[in-house]
Image (tube, rainbow, N blue to C red):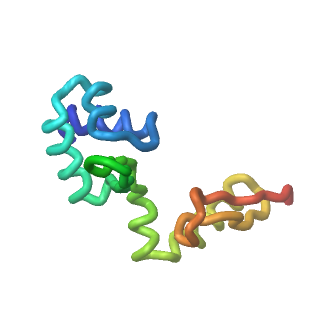
Amino acid sequence: MHPTRQAIVRALKSFRQATVKDLADTVGVKAITVRHHLNGLQAEGLVDVREQRQSIGRPLHYYSLACPYVLWEKRQPEVCQIDEILISALLDADGAKGSCLLAGDLSCAYGLQKA
């Protein structure tokens, strides 16, 4: 991956969501360069964009990392079941999924009970 793209991904990871200006300031490149790399990252399915309308002027675009794991699970939902089995086996505890990105939750979480 291009070093500028890597820097943008690291910035998005720390910001969670950011505008082109935020990213350009953080990475130290021009906004047009950030847009170019964001377009590439979006095409690869690694970045999502959310539009926020304002009362005056153009809408703001907030970029965030897309989870490639979620994209994989949408095509392969059995991955969730495998995760649950692996987590339970590795930690020697009974596990149950508490939340799931596929169900619309903000994260995946598993609850554990000592065996």
Give the residue displayed 39% in from the left and 49% down from the top. Answer: 65
Judging depth in this view, the residue of 52 and 37 nearest the camera is 52
User: x%, y% of residue 59?
Assistant: 31, 51
Task: Classify residue 7 as left or right of residue 73.
Answer: left
Give the residue displayed 38% in from the left and 53% down from the top. Answer: 52
User: x%, y% of residue 60?
Assistant: 33, 47
Answer above or below: position of 5 versus 68.
above
Task: Classify residue 54 as left or right of residue 101.
Answer: left
Give the residue displayed 45% in from the left and 64% down from the top. Answer: 70
Answer above or below: position of 89 versus 30.
below
Task: Classify residue 112 as left or right of residue 75.
Answer: right
Report the residue that reaches farthest toward the front: 56
| Residue 100 sits in quarter | bottom right
Answer above or below: position of 110 versus 11.
below
Q: Quadrant of the C terminus?
A: bottom right
User: x%, y% of residue 45?
Assistant: 29, 59
| Residue 113 sits in quarter | bottom right
Judging depth in this view, the residue of 7 and 77 nearest the camera is 7
Badge count: 0
| Residue 3 sits in quarter | top left
Answer above or below: position of 50 versus 6.
below
Q: Quadrant of the N terminus?
A: top left
Give the residue displayed 39% in from the left and 58% down from the top. Answer: 68
Judging depth in this view, the residue of 81 and 4 nearest the camera is 4
